[in-house]
Image (cartoon, helix red, strand yellow):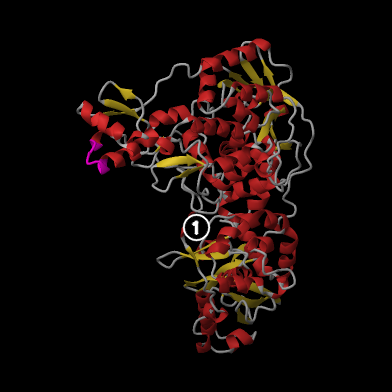
Amino acid sequence: MRYEQIERKMPHAWRQLIVTQSWCANLHQADKSLADLLTTPDKLAMLLEVLTSNERKTLQLVMSSFGCMPFTAEKLEREAALSLSGAQVSLSLLGLRRYGILVGFRKSWGDQLFILPEDAFDAWQALLFPTCLLQSGVTEIELGSHGDFDASMTYSRGLAQELFHFLESCSRQSVLPLTNKGTLHKKQLSKLTEHVSLPGTILSRSGLKYAFMDVYDEPAAFLLEIAIRMGFLYKNEQGDRFLLHEDSLRRWLHGSFVEQQGQLYDIWRGMMSPAFVWLQHAMALMERTVDERWYSVNELLQVIHEGCSSSSGYQQIEDTVLREELMASWLSPLGDFRFVELTRGVNQEIWFRWLIKLKPRQPEKELAIVSGQREQSPPSMYVQPDFEILITPDATLHTEWEIAAFADLISSDGVRMYRLTKESFQRALDLGWASTDVIRILQAHAYYDIPSGFILTLQQWEEQKDKLYIEDVTLLRCKSVEIADALLRHEKCRSYLGERIGESSFIVPQASLKHVTKCLESMGFHPNAKRQPKPNQTGDAARSPINATASCEPTSALDPIAGPCYSRDTIAIYDIDPHLPRQEDLYPNMAHIPASWIQEFRDYHPSTRKDMIRKAIEWRSLLQVRKEGRDCFIIPRMVREERSGWMLEGWEHYREISLREDEWNEMKIILPGINDGAL
């Protein structure tokens, strides 16, 4: 979950508590968001300076053990058991929540969950783990005997191209109806994914799940999810069909391929978040690398280990298992989408480098959409005499979208091949194109002149159009010639009637059907309603919602996602917990104990010592004891009774200890936040 989503759920009073603290009083302005305040590295560096030592340790534990995954206070205490007492963790958790670094949520049955917002992870990683970073990388690597990592990756142009083919197929459909279950029809789905070449396990190998597995295969579900998240597809008000949002799509098509790939990477990263803590570290580490340089996966694994080494859960993962998981769930999909390039070096070591521009990226250009002017693009295709059109890798998707309107795709890799046929050209003519439009587009983008035979053939095909065509019409039949003559004598009715067929029938244009019906009713006739065309099949209603400009805005990226993929961000369904416990709530009934237990560092009777230890365990606090002239701060775990006496068991500086009742002298209970100044 990101700060922008959190701020929308957060009570105003809670937000004010965060932004009015002294450390940021001179930084924050009323119109700034929490994301501006709590994700910017230089501002977080200032915040880090005001955190207590225990708050820093607790935040580091969260980063190492949970990342951006939800966690409970009990789980955090277990992770901190060797270094911090439960009271220290609770007090630190309270402080981190007050600063807005961590956010608390409450389930409907009362249980609490906490998270570190996803968009703050990268900055905190750089601040809290300054040595955890990949080296500068190399510009060239020596390839091994099998340098190519995967041939399927080598010839794929990228996820943006796959999404393009899916959306272009959607635009060709007259309608995208949904079943009662809310899914696309299987027959139509096969047409939409005809030119898609994504791996069949693209979701499952990354641990993503989706609905309607009996209808959608993984590539179809994935592309549908992306199209919805990007705002290209949305449901109509009735919820019985998908519509294409042309404005959103047009803006995206006008961007560069690198920009388009970058936007899709953001979508993919969002689908994978919140990720396992080791993967969250991998994502952030990779995004801090330099463009166009190669980095070793072995080194990446080593740095991940540095960032997660304190996590008990991570320590149980074997190196080989972690490598396989990293490749299957993250690096291989990035390679399939052409976000990164993967290769094998000497000793079969795997290397990666980015093929996209990572944030911050330049804002998307509003080319023809805003100004009405189209920049002159360089040549990007070859037009062959045999009606094949070869589109080079540097052609924009907008150019290819125009070509796809009148030509059929033959193959798609780095160079896309289209073939213009009489049928594909007829399809364009039916959409209102003319041969001059096709020729103009080809001439604008072709390296060489269009073959004269090519142009002549298009003109001939256009001349043949509409010389003969089939048209749906409504036939008005009269029971007698007298009734037909009466209709012609009626001035208003006569203006809506078409050609007379025989003695007693008329052709009624579709656009005039309603007017004719009203006229007939005013004359006392009642035409058979069963023979009227069904609604939504005449006039403007017959227009495809795909080809018409959408009338409503697509779902925002921060609104609940309506796609088939299940979100990993389960915390979003809960409400923010605005309650902050008071410090004294951590130590109930403190007034019932002798004040000396927390004020005086001295020797006590063995029975009193035992009572003090049990009270410290109850409060999850610490004990300060003096052993052999040295002060020790112990997190007590239990009092173990033996025949010869009893023993104190607990932890001191990450190690487990056991002390007999006579092995120390002075002692005192240490309550974090009250008398812990000596720590």
In this view, the residue in front, 467 or 429, is 467
Q: Residue at x 40, y 46 (%)?
A: 239
For residue 544, above or below residue 155: below
Residue closest to the eye, 416 or 441:
441
**Who's the residue at 56% across and 58% down the image?**
5
Q: Which residue is mark 1?
A: 572
* Residue at screen point 55% across, 30% down: 165
The residue positioned 51% from the left and 20% from the top of the image is 426
**Magenta stretch: dominant secondary structure:** loop
Range of residues picked out in magenta = 521-529
Closest to the observer, 356 or 68: 356
SS at circle 1:
helix
The magenta stretch spans residue 525: yes
Residue kind at label 1, given as amino acid type: Ala
Q: Quadrant of residue 50?
A: bottom right
Q: Quadrant of the N terminus?
A: bottom right
Q: Residue 100: say if magenta.
A: no
Give percent across and percent down for residue 178.
38, 39
Q: Residues within 10 Å of mark 1 (few under 14, many from 20)?
A: some
